[in-house]
Amino acid sequence: MNNSVGTNDLSVQMRSLSVFNMWISRMIYAAAKLGIADLIHEGPRSSDDLAASLGVDAGALYRMLRALSGAGVFTELPERRFALAPLGATLRTGAPGSMRDFVLLFGGDVYARAWLDLLSSVQSGKTAVEHVFGAPLYPYLAGHPEDAQLFDKAMTSFTYVDTVAAAARYDFSSFRTVVDVGGGHGSLLVAVLERNPELQGILFDQPHIIEGARTRVAASAVAARCEVIAGDFFEAVPSADVHVLKHIVCNWDDDAAIRILKNCHRALPPGGRILVIESVIGFSAPAELLDVHLLAVVGGRMRTEQEHRDLLAAAGFRLTRLLPTDVGLEHVVVEGVREP
């Protein structure tokens, strides 16, 4: 068998996977950090003009924008002018579906350094974040408010499409009260309540997150039906007849996840429902990649259907069905029913 490596399709593919994709991601981060999309969303501007506004080197900026135009992020026009391509429009601050905060988080110091140290996670089975920063992610964020704020905003934007799809995928019409456990700023809960006018909601998360959520919930059309409660899901969760946990269970190892689920079991009546919303290996195309990200960053994991079944059973639930959303990150609504 000839195992020689030459200028063939496989070597070109490996070059793209190992080098070019990383280069593009770093350029996208730089463009997001500089706010290029915000500066050109009203119309094309020259790289010289942009450089003057930003106080950066005009030649270097032009070269980066030219390369990003080749990647489909921007569109290069005559006289070194640049316009937003549809892909680049997702880097606008605050735009519907904006990915700017997501790019800033994943390309920023914490996540980038964790991924650079992925080898330590593979060698030890522990998070690279703890190896690099000396603390697990959540305690680290608690001591770094700016990083924590970016994390919260990024998680909201990261799953915007998936949030809308998940709210539409499940029929909440038979329930009276839903608790969004670890619901962040309330995007999912607000979407669910908007679609179900008879439903009452409780947004439950840590005190420092809830403070930021109160304003958003109060400004929504469902504020009168949405209570905001601060607490710790490792201690107890509010009672309801359905609990929603989106991007919660996957952030923890089995023991911690079961502890959270058991607290939900205590707060639900017999026959009450639990909805675990996240990517599922075997159903969601990016689940395997997200699984490695969780390994490096928080020590959690993405799970298969059987692993979800076993996890729910250990907490007193029976898995009843999986409802794929088939959009965005291809989240799955994993439904469980509380056993007596």
Image (cartoon, rainbow, N blue to C red):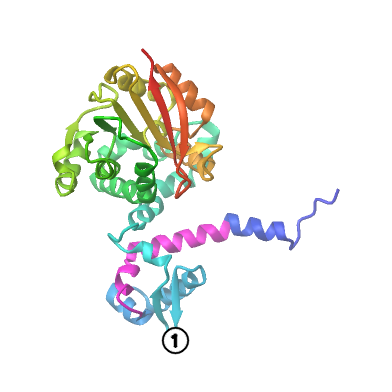
Q: Is residue 292 magenta?
A: no
Task: Give how far across and how far down residue 172 sits, in percent.
Answer: 32, 35
As drawn, is 185 to the left or to the right of 132? left
Residue at the extreme bottom: 79
Q: Which residue is mark 1?
A: 78
The residue lying at 38 percent from left, 51 percent from top is: 161
Q: Is residue 34 magenta?
A: yes
Residue at the extreme right: 1
Region in magenta:
19-44
Task: Give how far across and how far down residue 293 sits, in percent.
Answer: 47, 41
As drawn, is 14 to the left or to the right of 331? right
Kindly report the secondary structure that dominates the magenta region of the rendered protein: helix
Residue placed most toward the observer, 105 or 229: 229
Where the C terminus falls, by quadrant?
top left
Residue placed most toward the observer, 41 or 19: 41
Dot 1: what SS? loop
Figure check: 320 above or below 84:
above
Q: Residues within 10 Å of mark 1 (few under 14, many from 20)?
A: few
Task: Give how far across and how far down residue 203 sits, in percent.
Answer: 22, 35
Residue placed most toward the observer, 163 or 83: 163
The residue lying at 21 percent from left, 28 percent from top is: 231
Task: Give how far across and how far down residue 105 sits, in percent.
Answer: 36, 51
Three-letter amino acid code of the residue under disc 1: Pro
